[in-house]
Amino acid sequence: MIYDISVTALIFFCIFVGLVLGLSFYFGRKKSDSSSYYAAGGQIHWAVNGIAFAGDYLSAASFLGICGMIAIAGFDGFLYAIGFLAGWIVALFLIAEPFKRLGKYTFTDALNSKFNSRAITLAASVSTLIISIFYLIPQMVGAGDLVMPLLGLPHWAGVILVGAIVIAIVASAGMASTTYVQFLKGGLLIVLSLILTVYILKNGLSLSPGTKDNPSHTFIELEPQVESAGVAAVDGWEVLSQQEVSNKTFVKLRQNGVERWFYLTEKDGKPTLKETLTIVQKANGEKLYNGETKDKRKFYQVGHLSKIIVNGKEVEKTGAVGPFEFLSTIKESDVVRFLQTKLTDGTDQVAVYYPEVTAGAKFMLPGLKYKIGTDASLWSKLDFVSLMLALFLGTAALPHILIRYYTVKTPRDARKSTILAIAAIGGFYILTLFMGLGAAVNGVMDVESSNMAAPLLAKAFGAVLFSVISAVAFATVLGTVAGLIVASSGAIAHDFIDIYLKKNLNDDNKVKVGKIAAVIVGIFAILLGMAFKGINVSFLVGWAFAIAASANLPAILFLLFWKKTSSTGISASIVVGIVSSLAIILTSPTMWDKYGLGAENAMHQLENPALISFPLAVLTVYVFSMLYPKKEVSALVEA
């Protein structure tokens, strides 16, 4: 989209970034040993830790990704929120207290607490690093998306900016500053999301969303003369060509020297050409937006209702509505979504975003993104089950979440932190439903990035609300990335260099090496954030959850609850979980498309690997523990 720099947004952005850096430098002035750097010395109050849990977990995937996914896929997008929240049940009842008893600094410490195995140390540290990197990718993508409307900077500049700030946070004070950054942004994010939801309900629903100062674009419809060969003529336009892609017909027209693409469909039984949005990549490198250069500002935000039904009658708008009335009215109405297809026009590559009217009842039920009905393919059904499995099992195995259990004093505090986190996260996810649906019907969607749904919705209600929410969303990315980099630096400095390589670092050197590792991981995250531009961040986070569920959770559960678990079984299951999940992800349709080979040509059609990789890892830990029995007392139940 085309964004202008907002002075108000810039002011709030500078205030929040200044506050975050101030916290970091404040804690950085204090003497920091390795316990303080990696686990805040275990002195964080359980209530602060609970909100920090929420702040860490409510990442770019939650605020940016889920809202955007709901806006484009309705209830299917909300399934991510359900899965993310359900995973905390596993963490609460199976992991929280026993895991606190096992560890000191890192996930590897806990897993290896009863074995002192170099194989576990190596496998677990590599697992932590890989999962953290996969979780870092969507955070950096989200950061780049946020900076475009906030500061008017390109995506790559946003990625570099957030990377530089986070490196400063982590390198200054580690987990102590990270915890309070996460506490601050977690609380603010929940409060501001509630305010935005109130605005949505007060504004109600309208066929012509937008404000007097910022009206939404009205998409035109043309009546063509259609013959057997296709569109023959359109009043006021010159017909140039037409193409059929996936059983849909697109017609290229010209008016006043500007070439545009329209979508041929039917309305009330008559042929109709509906206006689309197009991005044309010319062979000479020039890019045209709706047939003109970007500075002409002819590329619009989308998303509206084509029909509003209240009590069985069509209306133009509803006025203020309650939460249940808001949901029921959308269910009875028709939602206009913009879908993407690609075509080739001579030497030009054309991305076409065309309108598709979707019944509200269909929009509010599963099936738009994940086909699970009787007409769905086997791949689609398997992919859906695989995603839900990853989301449900992945939370309790994310290294940057697990290390937060070491920041409190006792196992009881760990449990109380988890309960508070569940309450805060659950409340927030209810709000994402209203924010996502609000974005879908208020003409604020950026077709190039669904990740901007919530911030752009806030912008429609005023510059101040947009500025504050965007700044907090940016802080959300900062907090999550900081936690991930702390986990990564711990895996490199403490687990791999100090323990596996037996360098026996003293306390000061552990901190120094951790800070160097944080800088390296941060730079790597910046490069990956640029490479994955444009992909929905919730979708990307799903991969991190799948790897965590496959590589870490089987090892954790067997260690805690099966007394015959051996060090060989644990290390082997981690390796199998990592390799199998990565193999499926790297050969998935999304990655095949990223390679330029075409998603339809992928080796398989499974996007989410957990359905295969998790059972393989479970089987591995059992078989290898039986084949290579433990020599030490290893299970917590024996302690």
Image: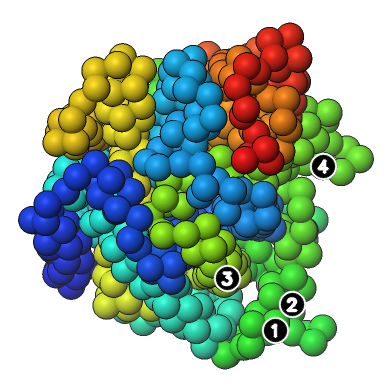
Q: Say the numbered circle drawn on residue 372.
A: 4
Q: Say the numbered circle drawn on residue 325.
A: 1
**Callout 4: few (<14), some (14-19), or many (20+) C-alpha neighbours within 10 Å?**
some
- Percent across and percent down for residue 166 are 22, 46
**Callout 2: few (<14), some (14-19), or many (20+) C-alpha neighbours within 10 Å?**
some
Q: Nearer the viewer, mark 1 or mark 3?
A: 3
Q: Nearer the viewer, mark 3 or mark 2?
A: 3
Q: Callout 3, which amino acid?
A: Ala
- Percent across and percent down for residue 345 are 47, 24
Q: Is residue 363 left or right of residue 287?
A: right
Q: Which residue was labeled with disc 3?
A: 423
Of callouts 2 and 4, the N-terminal one: 2
Q: Nearer the viewer, mark 3 or mark 4?
A: 3
- Helix, strand or loop at label 2? It is helix
Q: How is the image coloured?
A: rainbow
Q: Which residue was labeled with disc 2?
A: 328
Camera-nearest residue between 33 and 544 = 33
Camera-nearest residue between 66 and 225 = 66
- Percent across and percent down for residue 99 are 55, 46
Rounded to the nearest angstrom, the CA distance separating label 3 from label 4 is 30 Å
Please tell me which residue is depicted at 11% across the width and 56% down the height of the picture.
Answer: 30
Rounded to the nearest angstrom, the CA distance separating label 2 from label 4 is 23 Å
Q: Quadrant of residue 222?
A: bottom right
- Helix, strand or loop at label 3? It is helix
Q: Quadrant of residue 187?
A: bottom left
Rounded to the nearest angstrom, the CA distance separating label 1 from label 3 is 25 Å
